[in-house]
Image (cartoon, helix red, strand yellow):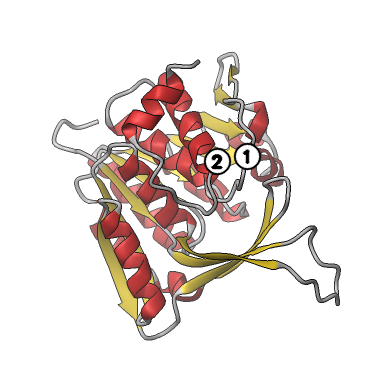
Amino acid sequence: MSESLSGVAVVGSANVDLVVEVARPPLVGETLLGRAGGRFSGGKGLNQAVAAARSGADVRFCGSVGADEAGDLLRRTLVDAGVTAGLRRTDAAPTGVAHILALPDGDNSIVVAAGANEELTAEDAVSGVAGAAVVLAQLEVPAETVDAALRAGRHAGARTLLNAAPAAESALALLAHVDVLIVNETECAELGGADRLHAAGAETIVLTRGGDGVELHRAGEPVLRIPAFPIDPVDTTGAGDAFCGALAAALAAGVAIEDALVTASAAGAIVALHRGANTAALAPAALAALVATR
């Protein structure tokens, strides 16, 4: 990594999350009554950028929103969290929206309408990652945009992270430009498993397993398992994104990946203890305190 590079650049999605609390998911054709859980800023990209900033990193975000009030809300969320917001405003589509069904056990089901996220271009991405020490992307914006971000970051000497969520076969073509691949158990299985991902070019795979902790898979090395912090989750929405953002922040600070994964796990736990995908409770002091309990 070049000494002239610094901070984290996140290229990805920004949505408004509409949360409804339900006892169970509805059946096909069924109308199910629930309770309004709130309206929050979200999107994997925005969530990860906010988490990286709240974990102590200098963060820039590259995303696209509509020319609407929801886009204004997302910009304020980024700025309030200390993120430099490089947002494309477009009249071509409204700001993306995620409809989240929050279940009693803390799990959730999510349906996303991409909206303006589909307008984010490769040119936006290349500009957005310039000078960053760590580039972090997901798969809620066009694949060619993610590809451009990873290629540009790798070419400049940045460490590149891809959270392959939602899982898509297009991720396999990106792995040649990825230093660290982050997937959960479902995503890993949908992409063919760790062995297939290694064969496709992923040398380092971070596999998150919720309450069962995290696994670090490196080609030719034993699997490193890191236990989860024991918590009673309130809402797991955004916990995985907090993990990714905190991991990017720690790696940008020069922390070894083995230790960075512990800090990232703590970030996911802190967010899971609060309603919504983002919480001001995530802060360097809170992370240090929780990590100290390990």
Q: Is residue 78 visible?
A: yes
Q: Quadrant of the N terminus?
A: top left
269 and 155: which one is in front?
A: 269
Residue 105, horizontal then vertical, whole percent: 73, 45
Q: Is residue 123 visible?
A: no
Which quadrant of the figure has residue 291? top left
**279 w.r.t. 250: above or below:** below
**SS category of the residue bearing label 1:** loop
Numbered badge on residue 273: 2
Locate residue 19 relative to residue 268 in the image: left or right.
Answer: right
Q: Nearer the viewer, residue 252 or 53?
A: 53
Label 1 Cα crowd, 10 Å radius (few <14 / some 14-19 / many 20+) = some
SS for dot 2: loop
Indicate which disc residue 252 carries.
none
Above or below for 33 versus 219: below
Q: Where does the image place residue 163, in percent across and percent down from the top left?
A: 50, 45
Q: Earlier in the sequence, mark 1 or mark 2?
A: 1
- Say whether residue 282 is left or right of residue 57: right
What amino acid type should be assigned to the residue bearing mark 1? Pro
In the drawing, what numbered circle is on residue 233?
Answer: 1
Residue occupying image coordinates x 31% and y 58% = 78
Residue at image coords 67%, 38%: 185
Q: Is residue 235 left or right of residue 135?
A: right
Image position, residue 157 (x, y; %): 25, 37
